[in-house]
């Protein structure tokens, strides 16, 4: 979550004569230093604003003379391209931040951000696996595979902690305490949280660290916990491929992703009686409203059970 602040006090030294590209770079400097956004979020915002500037260039429009109608035309163009409402809503959030930044620093004369409305977002229920399917996924690994220990540790940790794929990829050895049984995670907005992990995940991670990581380690490894076959820190796309590979092997289809295991972590905790606020803290959600989506998943499961077993259906 981005910290609230007085945008007009960010940098009084910025002249309004800056070129538009300079304003873009100043904005991303602000997001990096002041807001502490993650690299992946910055990349997404850069793509979003690149779409806006490309649209403006194509229609011979200037950022300096931007108005709300032009922004709405851009958003309608995105809708015509077939983008989902959630994707457009994310772009609106990015554009609104940029407009507020430009207005607060005197580049724009009008506060266009206050006029920009977000499209209504439908709340889609996340895909959640049954306990037995999670067991099938974890059992799909072959102990004879070269990277069995690493891949098993990745799957176990994702399900045991509910951390995001980017958080797992960025995990370092100093944030992992297997003796006590927890992992320190740096999440969105550079916020840190401590997440406990169970005995099963601890044992698998210990085996990976002692038997395989030392063999994979190279000069480029640094303190990263999970390494690629070349010894470099594993990236999020590689983790994604690992999860989808074993999901197919387990017969679960191609729609299972690292985020699916995060959904399973949260939903299974709530089904077991965990407090919603506790799950919010473990997931690193800034607002409990985000976590409440999992209560809807649990209710849908209860409704299915009721319809299946109640004699008066």
Image (tube, rainbow, N blue to C red):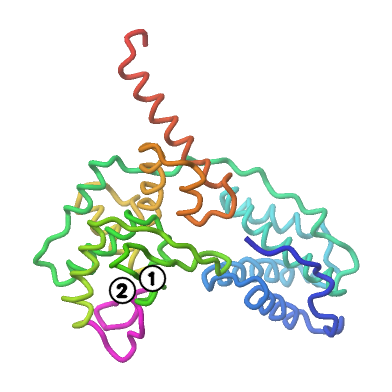
Q: Is residue 239 magenta?
A: no
Residue lying at the far bottom in this picture: please name it. 219
Q: Position of residue 20 (x, y in %)?
A: 77, 79
Q: Residue at x 25, y 84 (%)?
A: 217
Look at the numbered discs 1 and 2 and tell me whether their residues touch, using CB distance below 8 Å. Answer: yes
Q: Can you say which quadrant of the picture contains the C terminus? A: top left
Residue 148 lies in quadrant: bottom left
Nearest the eye: 196 or 69: 196
Q: Residue furthest left?
A: 144
The answer for how far apart the CA atoms under marks 1 and 2 are is 7 Å
Q: Determine which residue is flagged by label 1.
A: 169
Q: Which residue is mark 2?
A: 226
Left or right: residue 155 versus residue 97 is left
What residue is shown at x 53% (from left), y 73% (from top)? 39
Side (left or right) of 200 relative to 269? left
Q: Quadrant of the N terminus?
A: bottom right
Q: Residue at x 58, y 50 (%)?
A: 86
- Residues in magenta? 216-236
Q: Is residue 227 magenta?
A: yes
Say how many tags the image has: 2
Q: Earlier in the sequence, mark 1 or mark 2?
A: 1
């Amino acid at each position: 979550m981005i910290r609230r602040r007085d945008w007009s006090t960010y940098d009084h030294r910025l002249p309004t004569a800056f070129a538009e590209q300079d304003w873009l770079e100043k904005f991303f400097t602000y997001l990096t230093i002041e807001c502490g956004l993650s690299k992946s979020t910055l990349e997404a915002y850069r793509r979003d604003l690149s779409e806006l500037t490309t649209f403006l260039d194509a229609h011979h429009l200037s950022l300096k003379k931007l108005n709300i109608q032009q922004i709405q035309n851009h958003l309608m163009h995105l809708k015509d391209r077939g983008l989902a409402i959630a994707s457009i809503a994310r772009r609106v959030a990015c554009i609104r931040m940029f407009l507020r930044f430009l207005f607060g620093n005197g580049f724009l004369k009008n506060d266009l951000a206050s006029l920009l409305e977000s499209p209504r977002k439908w709340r889609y229920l996340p895909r959640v696996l049954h306990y037995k399917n999670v067991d099938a996924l974890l059992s799909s690994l072959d102990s004879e595979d070269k990277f069995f220990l690493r891949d098993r540790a990745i799957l176990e940790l994702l399900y045991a902690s509910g951390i995001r794929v980017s958080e797992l990829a960025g995990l370092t050895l100093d944030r992992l305490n297997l003796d006590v049984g927890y992992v320190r995670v740096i999440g969105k907005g550079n916020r840190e949280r401590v997440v406990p992990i169970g005995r099963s995940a601890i044992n698998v991670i210990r085996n990976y660290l002692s038997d395989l990581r030392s063999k994979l380690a190279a000069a480029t490894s640094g303190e990263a916990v999970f390494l690629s076959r070349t010894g470099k820190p594993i990236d999020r796309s590689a983790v994604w491929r690992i999860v989808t590979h074993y999901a197919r092997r387990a017969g679960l289809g191609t729609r299972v992703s690292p985020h699916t295991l995060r959904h399973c972590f949260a939903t299974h905790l709530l089904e077991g009686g965990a407090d919603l606020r506790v799950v919010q803290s473990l997931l690193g959600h800034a607002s409990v409203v985000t976590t409440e989506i999992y209560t809807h998943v649990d209710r849908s499961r209860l409704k299915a059970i009721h319809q299946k077993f109640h004699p008066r259906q």
